[in-house]
Image (cartoon, rainbow, N blue to C red):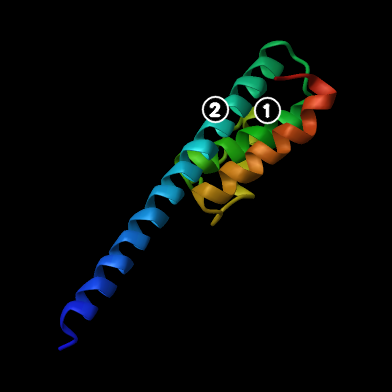
Amino acid sequence: MFGSAGKAVDEQVSHAGQGISQAAHAVGNKMDELFKSSADSASKWEADKKAPPDVLAKIHGLFQQATAGDASGDPPADASMKAKFEAWTANKGMSKEDAMAAYTKFIDEKKAEYGGA
């Protein structure tokens, strides 16, 4: 109906969509890098026993939400595992992306206290 003008518009829209897709992919890759770096810091804090149990529970809850989604099942009987499970269930319904962002932000806030790159 619109001939060559319509085709040109379709091509521009298609090209713009590809640019948006590439930008979204780049943002996703950057978030993955930040998340992995944050996880390295958190692992070190846990191994070195630098962070208290409540901080480790929150870290665990956000990590699990980001990597596994909503918690299911009954809480464990062990007190420390139960605290981590409850921290995970507190994030129910949070998207993977939001959990990754919250995790990264929380780790960044704690780096001054516990160290990290």
Q: Which mark is residue 80?
A: 1
Q: What is the tally of numbered marks visible in this picture? A: 2
Whether tag 2 and tag 1 are in contact, CB under 8 A, the answer is no
Q: For the residue labelled by badge 2, is the local secondary structure a helix, a strand or a loop?
A: helix
Disc 2 residue type (three-letter):
Lys
Figure check: 15 above or below 68: below
Q: Is residue 86 visible?
A: no
Quarter of the figure that contains the C terminus: top right
Q: At 72% from the left edge and 10% from the top edge, which residue is drawn?
A: 48
Q: At 71% from the left edge and 32% from the top edge, which residue is drawn?
A: 107
Task: Rate crowding at label 1 as few (under 14), some (14 to 19) or many (20 or more) other CA atoms within 10 Å.
Answer: some
Nearer to us in this view, 72 or 42: 42
Q: At 78% from the left edge and 35% from the top edge, which residue is drawn?
A: 109
Q: Is residue 19 visible?
A: yes
Q: Where on the picture, by quarter, is residue 81?
A: top right
Disc 1 residue type (three-letter):
Ser
Figure check: 94 above or below 59: below
What residue is disc 2 on?
36
Q: At 23% from the left edge and 79% from the top edge, which residue is drawn?
A: 5
Nearer to us in this view, 31 or 6: 6
Figure check: 90 above or below 31: below
Percent of width and height locating residue 100: 57, 42
Q: Which mark is residue 69?
A: none
